[in-house]
Structure formats: C-alpha cells, structure tokens
Amino acid sequence: MQEGMGRLVNIIARTILSILGVIAGYQLAQYLSSSSWWPTSALIWDMAMWGFVIMIPALLGYLLAPLFVRGIARIGIIFERSLQTFAWQDLFVAILGLIIGLIVANLLAMPLSSIPNLGFYLAILLNVVLGYVGLILFLKRKDEIISMWSSFELLRDRLHLKGKKMRDEFNHDSIKLLDTSALIDGRILDIARVGFIEGVMCIPGFVLLELQAIADSTDPLRRAKGRRGMEVVEELQKLPNFKLEILEQPLKELKVDTVDEGLIELAKKLKAKIITTDYNLNKIASIQGLDVLNVNDLANALKPVLIPGETLEVDVIKEGKEPNQGVAYLTDGTMLVVEDGEKYIGKRVEVVITSLLQTSAGRMIFGRVRRVTG
C-alpha cells in the first residue's frame, strides 16, 4: 500500500517538475534566442537549439523529482518532530510571521513581476526569502509579541466586563414586566402617556395569551375586561417615545405552570421589575426579593392626604358590611365607611375622619357623622 502510494507520488512529482522545466526552458530559450551566437541562419538549427534548451530543464525536473520527494518527506518528518516539542504560542507566532512575510513579499513582487522572463522567478524567490525572514524574526521576538497580545486581551476583557456590568445595571433599572391585572386596570396607559415610566416596558407572550382567553370568555364582564386589556396594549404600542416589547417566552421554557409564576421567573432572569395591581402577586414577588411597582400604591401615594380630625362633605350611598354602617366615596374613588351612617343613605353629610387604613389593595377611611348638610 505504502509502496504503491510512493510510486504515485513520484509520478505526480515528475509530471509537475517536468512541466515546470518545460516552461522554464521555453522562457530561457526565448531569452537566449536574441543573443548573437544563437544559430538563426538555418531553421533546423534554430529549432534544434530551442528543443535542446527546453528539454534540459525538463529532463532535470524529471530526474530530480524522486530526490525532491524524498527531501520534502524528510523536511516533513523533521517538521513533525519539531512540532512535538513546539509550544502553541511559538507555532502561532511562527505562522503569524510567515503570513506577514508573505504579504510583504507579494507587495514587493508586484512591480518586479513586469520584468520579462525573470519576474515570475523573482516573485517566488521573494516569497521564500521574506516568508522565512518573517518566520525567524517573529520567533526571535516571540516574548514581546506574546506580551503585546496579552495586553490586548486584558484590555478587551476589561472593556467586556465593563460593558457587561453597564448592561446588567441598565437592564436591572430599565426593564419592567407588565402583568395581566395592570393591563386590565388600564391606568398604566395614563401613567405611560404622561411620561412617568422610563426604560423598556415588556409584555410576556403568556400574558397576552391570558388576556386573549379572558377576552374570549362567555362571561360578559370578563370578556369586557379582556378586551379592555387588549385595547390598552394597542394604545401603548402607539405612544411616541415609549418602548414596548413583546417577549415570546413560553411558560414551558421557564418550567412553570401559571402566569404569575412565569412573571416571577422571567423577572429573576431579566432582573426586571413587575408592574401589577394584583395584591397576591405583589406579596409573592416581594417575598422572593423582586422589585414590584404596584399601580395601586402609586395611586394611593397621589391621593390627597387626610388626617384624623379633618372634616369633609360626602353623599352616603349604601349600607356597609357591619350593622348601621354607611358607605360613601371620595372624588378619587376612595371608600369612606361612615359609622352609624345607614340612616343617612341618600343624604349629604359632614363627616369627621376618625381613622385610615392603607393597604396595597387601596385605602379605606373611617369617619362619623357630624351633621347633615343636605
């Protein structure tokens, strides 16, 4: 097998070197034919001289081919042995030096290639010489080159870490996840419209699916809420200078079953804040260390501040849960429980504030009737 392969390699080498010899002999004969001693008096002598000059290099190529193959094989063995003790840094530097040497050689060979007959050989010579020079020069300066490369790597790592840190800080501060309850509530649209929300607002795909399921409900109230939520999404997308993205993140990829669990896992993954009006989701997310922006908390923070002892006029409109209680509402929708107010239903009364109860679900005010005003 190896003997047959060696014979094939010899045939190929002899063919290639013979063809190169013919080309070299032709160019040499073309150059010598212009000399004064070249026999041009008789055509037969001229042709014989051409044949002789062409055949000599071709014959030399044919005869020297086996030596050339053995030399290449010996160089390959030496090269293979050298690679076994060659560090990868040395190999990298050597290849780099060879490439740079060949680039310089080809740049210098471009003007020399126009020289008749010799240009081609000068280009080959330049490639061999400068390629070797580049390889040796870089190997001798390998420590400096490796040190310079390490400096570049260190700088790149520093910039990468700095950029990653900045991205993490930016993501943590800017990404906000909208849940179903906040979209159905609708007040997030007004908050976004007046520019109180910064960064990127994201709606997970599973939240939209839940909205669609609510909108397709047979219950008229749930259907109206679902459609309201879809309309809020459309309006948010139309707002100028407001970034809204839909995250196609299935619950299966988050390895959870419910929308609330998906929001919590996605918030952990993106280091995002959750915008909601759901009291239970607010509590669970807070327990797990997530930042939650509750629209109800914001609305409560913007309500007028009332303190016990203040008076205000309200209309008692219905009875309360406890006996004799009446219920009224302030202009901002806050519930006011009036003690002994059941008998004043349908009347306008002046109420003295006795206590306040603040929760994430809203604010409740308790008071007692001072006098009837209408």
Image (tube, grey):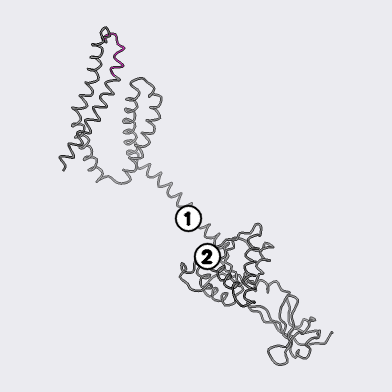
Image position of 155 with respect to 341: above or below: above
Residue projecting furthest to the front: 218
Per the rendering, the mark at residue 244 is: none
Q: How many numbered marks does the figure carry?
A: 2
Residue assigned mark 1: 161
90 with respect to 184 (left or right): left
Label 1 vs 2, first from the N-terminus? 1
Q: Residue 276 location in percent, x, y?
A: 60, 71
Residue assigned mark 2: 271
Which amino acid lies under the numbered mark 2 shown in the image of this protein? Answer: Lys
Q: Residue 320 location in percent, x, y?
A: 70, 88
Magenta part of the chain:
28-37
Residue projecting furthest to the bottom: 323
Residue drawn at 64 percent across, 79 percent down: 359
12 with respect to 178 (left or right): left
Q: Secondary structure at mark 1?
A: helix
Cα distance between the residues tagged 1 and 2: 18 Å
**Pair 1/2: label in front:** 2
Residue closer to the observer: 65 or 339: 65
Which amino acid lies under the numbered mark 1 shown in the image of this protein? Answer: Leu
Quarter-wise, where is residue 371 in the image?
bottom right
Q: Residues within 10 Å of mark 1 (few under 14, many from 20)?
A: few
Quarter-wise, where is residue 91 in the image?
top left
Residue closer to the observer: 218 or 259: 218
Image position of 211 with respect to 345: above or below: above
Q: Residue 222 location in percent, x, y?
A: 62, 76
Q: Residue 216 location in percent, x, y?
A: 59, 72
